[in-house]
Image (spheres, helix red, strand yellow):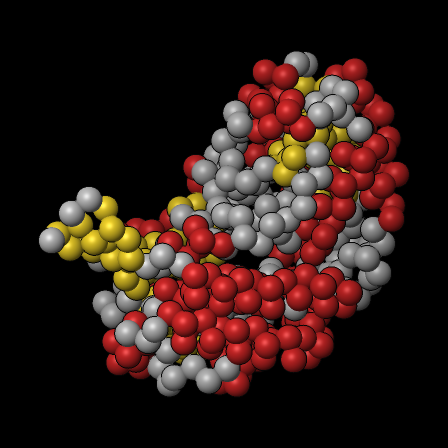
Amino acid sequence: QAARAAFPGWAATPPAERAARLSALSDALAARKDELAETITAELGAPLPLSQTVHAGLPVLVAASYAELAASYAFEERIGTSTVLLEPVGVVGAITPWNYPLHQIVAKVAPALAAGCTVVLKPAEDTPLTAQLFAEATESAGLPPGVFNLVTGLGPVAGQALAAHEGVDLVSFTGSTAVGRQIGATAGGAIKRVALELGGKSANVILPGADLARAVNVGIANVMSNSGQTCSAWTRMLVDAERYEEAVTLAAEAVLKYVPGERVGPLVNAKQQARVRGYIRKGMEEGARLVAGGPEAPLETGYYVSPTVFADVTPEMTIAQEEIFGPVVSILRYEDVDDALRIANGTVYGLAGAVWAADDEEAVAFARRMETGQVDINGGRFNPLAPFGGYKQSGVGRELGPHGLAEYLQTKSLQF
């Protein structure tokens, strides 16, 4: 009700003023960066350096990027005899996960506010304190009452109520594909829009002639970051048969640098720890070769999982098909480039990926054939303005940059 009451006034607020509030929000987050990082480490278990640089640092940049977009975006254009207006869709119900608790909040709330929408946020129950700090930052930024609203609670209770509520015009959800399917069905019954960022099983494709050592080391680092709790992690490493064993040796050596309790934090809770250890056991049962790590807990205290590398993984194995969401890498062998593409595209997911080749042109040619939403070429850096989202069962819609803003707009044409 608060969001609905605030919507007309916020939607009518000039984009330049909305931009100013978003700029103030970015500044408020930056001012509390240390507190946010320490809270995320306490709630999630991420090592403090990661919390400082990624978990607390990236959202500051994203909020600032939407301040710039709100001020410069073309909310109106002339096409022939029509004026086309891009207007806010209404009240947004945002349901966010625990793995990147602040980033996922900002990636939804900032573009929604830039578009002129009002928001009701339901954060993950494992990381509610980070959301509380964000709510305080919105007050510091001077957002009018009701423009941003925070409701904590369990997903099946508060999340379901938010997704089903007749006063919500769009549901933006990040989480598992299973829950995304439920939210999509609920929203479909009410003919309301959804933006769903769901699971992934991304391929790290190392083509013949690529810098093998660099590709393997960067690939291992990608999966070990955030203890493997990243939907876009490159959890499948694809290597040609000729260099396969060399890659396995490099991966086994590289993963030794990721020491639990130092560079790799615990998983978020006991349930997640048990789930990931179960997948490791499943990989061993199905015949994959364990070359590093294993199902045993590496430390007596904390929800840690040993950084794990499997070799001799075949495409049909469970660990090559299902999202594990832990520090586990599967190395698969391919015979030629077409075989690599078949394996890379051979899951129900399509969120991210990587391609390494002797030159960018060759890598780009391969990436164009991949069924996935975002591909890093020869170690390309993350771009917070590039659209992020998936193909197939990895989701619907995009986040970040102008494509993320467009998710929260609807179109009206005036003919004269």
* Percent position of residue 345, x then y: 53, 28
Q: Position of residue 280 (x, y in %)?
A: 70, 42
- Tell me which corner region of the image, top left, top right, bottom left or bottom right, holds residue 322: top right
Query: 158 or 203: nearer the eye?
Result: 203
The answer to whether residue 269 is above or below residue 281 is: below
Task: Please state if 103 lies on the left or on the right of 301 as rendered.
Answer: left
On screen, 49 above or below 410? below
Q: Quadrant of residue 273?
A: bottom right
Q: Residue at x 55, y 40 (%)?
A: 374
Q: Residue at x 64, y 45 (%)?
A: 233
Q: How many marks?
A: 0
For image coordinates 65% across by 22% down, the residue present is 362
Q: x and y percent of residue 162 in the render?
A: 34, 68
- The residue at the point 78 percent across, 50 percent down is 306
Residue lying at the far left of the rendered structure: 416
Relative depth, front residue between 107 and 42: 107
Q: Is residue 217 visible?
A: yes
Q: Position of residue 230 (x, y in %)?
A: 62, 51
In the rendered image, the quadrant that contains the N terminus is bottom left
